[in-house]
Amino acid sequence: MRLTVLGCAGSFPGPESPCSAYLMEAEGFRLLIDFGVGSLSTLQRYVGLHAPDAVLLTHLHCDHMFDAVSYVVVRRYAPDGPYPPLPMYAPSGAPDRLAAAYGQEEGSVEDVYQFYGLQPGTFPIGPFSVTVDRMNHPVETYGVRLEHGGRVFCYSADTAPCEALLRLAQDADVFLCEASYMDGVENPPDLHLTGREAGEAATKAGVGRLLLTHLVPAWGSESQTVEAAAGAYAGPLDVVRPGACYDV
């Protein structure tokens, strides 16, 4: 499996990155996980406008899904279009949310996306075995575990600490984990992880490599987040950037 980071800013676009979007590839199949604000630009820059074979939205906050609205134009109104519906795996409210954001006067977006509602469990997408479970976040949110060729990738999505995250990340080769909040301050509960909490989750789950994402530069220092995570996790650790690629 190969991971390409298209966007990694947390909660809103940062000065150097669009919001969350990650392309996972195996056997020539490309699964786009999240499609946050600004990531349609980096999709074109790093992999190509029509690269995704399927999309998985972990939840329906704008920083994880809003460019799926802009993508309607790409597939519906292209000179060589319209394109066939693209498989989209998402929380149950996705069809209505995307249609409302695009504009109710044009009706549904089900000519653009073929929707599959997420619920906890395991199912195939292309060559991947996908397992999702509910995370600790204010809206219906799913962490993601992908398995292929004996390798395991886990993505936290947005979450505060929870047992489901540890189950999904167990023995993962690569753990892409959010670290939105700063340690040592009073943060809103049941919303996001700190760097220390991301490191603790990686240690408890026994992962091989920790990739920190969804940092919010406006809320604090990246170096402090990394230091806090490294204090709780002794393995290889990186902060992801747009355009970065990782073999899983």
Image (spheres, rainbow, N blue to C red):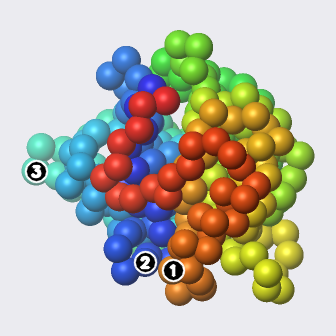
Q: Earlier in the sequence, mark 3 or mark 1?
A: 3
x and y, in percent, of residue 74 in the image: 25, 55
SS class, disc 3:
loop
Q: Are marks 1 and 2 in contact (CB under 8 Å)?
A: yes
Q: Are marks 3 and 1 in contact (CB under 8 Å)?
A: no
SS class, disc 1:
helix
Identify whether 230 is placed above or below 167. Answer: below
SS class, disc 2:
loop
Q: Earlier in the sequence, mark 2 or mark 3?
A: 2
Residue 2, image quadrant:
top left
Task: Quarter of the image for the N terminus: give it.
Answer: top left
Q: CA distance from mark 3 to mark 1?
A: 39 Å
Residue 246, image quadrant:
top left
Q: CA distance from mark 1 to mark 2?
A: 7 Å
x and y, in percent, of residue 247 in the image: 42, 31
Identify whether 214 is placed above or below 46. Answer: below
Q: CA distance from mark 2 to mark 3?
A: 33 Å
Instruction: Identify which residue, 188 or 206, lies in the foreground.
Output: 206
Identify whether 152 is placed above or below 195. Answer: above
Q: Which residue is mark 1?
A: 217
Q: Earlier in the sequence, mark 1 or mark 2?
A: 2
10 Å crowding of disc 1: few (<14), some (14-19), many (20+) = some
- Which marked residue is nearer to the observer: mark 3 or mark 1? 1
Q: Which residue is mark 3?
A: 79
Residue ID at (79%, 81%)? 184
Q: Which residue is mark 2?
A: 14
Identify whether 68 is placed above or below 165. Answer: below
Residue type pointed to by label 1 = Pro
